[in-house]
């Protein structure tokens, strides 16, 4: 009889212990959920967050524009790599012309779009801009390949990433290779609402616009 009573008491204690353990786990889970709900996804600088913020930045969303000057240009502009590419594709032609004020040294060139250039280049600019002497042609945008490393220093961090050009059209493909990779580093700062890309000048880091302008070809 005693053994039976002891067994009953043991069973009661065992159930009570299980219930207490489940309550403890439930409490821990509840505390964890409260803690997580108070945190923003931007509170932790991960490669995923850095990737999302860089890809969503103006430097990556806004298209790169090439300014094609129609009319008299300096010899320096006419023999630049970009103009040579346009010449090679038969989109522009030119004849020598007197240099206007501010253009030197001679010779200067009167640049015109060829028939092929009219079909190819002018189709890429708004109709109201097509007859202007300066044609702003959207040619490419930056595409993030991946974040390669994060170095944190308290509330600051340097994020290393690799990117490439994504040509938007035939002119972009001629001017920008989609095969080349570039390495850049941008500074992030931790604010009260989480991590953000640096938007102002800093002694130790650089803004994203400067980071991509100062990019180095990847080896």
Image: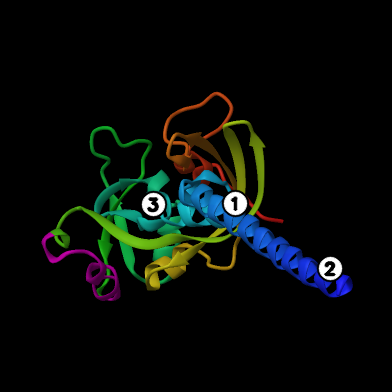
Mark 3 vs mark 1: in front: 1
Looking at the rendered structure, which numbered label has been put on residue 78? 3
Whole-Å distance between the Cαs marked 3 and 1? 46 Å
Mark 3 vs mark 2: in front: 2
Residue 146 sits in quarter: bottom right
187 sits to left or right of 16: left
Is label 2 in a helix, a strand or a loop?
helix
186 is higher (above) or lower (below) than 137? above
For label 1, the residue is: 46
Whole-Å distance between the Cαs marked 3 and 2? 101 Å
Q: Earlier in the sequence, mark 3 or mark 1?
A: 1
Give percent across and percent down for residue 129: 15, 59
Q: Nearer the viewer, residue 96 or 156?
A: 156
Q: Nearer the viewer, residue 59 or 111?
A: 59
Q: Tell me if residue 34 is in the magenta stretch.
A: no
Label 3: few (<14), some (14–19) or many (≥20) C-alpha neighbours in 10 Å = many
Residue range (magenta): 116-128
Q: Earlier in the sequence, mark 3 or mark 2?
A: 2
Looking at the rendered structure, which numbered label has been put on residue 6? 2
* Residue with the most extreme front position: 1
Q: Nearer the viewer, residue 105 or 34?
A: 34
């Amino acid at each position: 009889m005693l053994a039976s009573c002891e067994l009953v008491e043991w069973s009661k204690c065992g159930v009570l212990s299980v219930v207490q353990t489940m309550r403890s786990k439930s409490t821990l889970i509840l505390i964890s959920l409260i803690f997580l709900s108070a945190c923003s996804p931007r509170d932790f600088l991960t490669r995923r967050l850095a990737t999302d913020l860089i890809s969503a930045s103006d430097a990556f969303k806004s298209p790169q524009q090439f300014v094609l000057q129609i009319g008299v240009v300096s010899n320096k502009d006419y023999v630049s790599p970009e103009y040579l590419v346009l010449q090679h594709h038969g989109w522009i032609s030119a004849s020598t012309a007197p240099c206007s004020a501010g253009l030197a040294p001679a010779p200067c060139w009167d640049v015109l779009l060829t028939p092929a250039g009219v079909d190819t280049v002018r189709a890429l600019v708004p109709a109201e801009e097509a007859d202007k002497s300066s044609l702003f042609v959207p040619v490419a945008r930056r595409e993030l390949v991946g974040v390669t490393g994060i170095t944190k220093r308290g509330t600051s961090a340097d994020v290393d990433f690799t990117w490439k050009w994504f040509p938007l059209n035939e002119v972009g493909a001629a001017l920008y290779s989609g095969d080349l990779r570039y390495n850049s580093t941008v500074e992030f700062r931790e604010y009260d609402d989480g991590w953000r890309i640096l938007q102002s000048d800093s002694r130790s880091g650089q803004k994203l616009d400067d980071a991509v302008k100062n990019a180095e070809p990847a080896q």
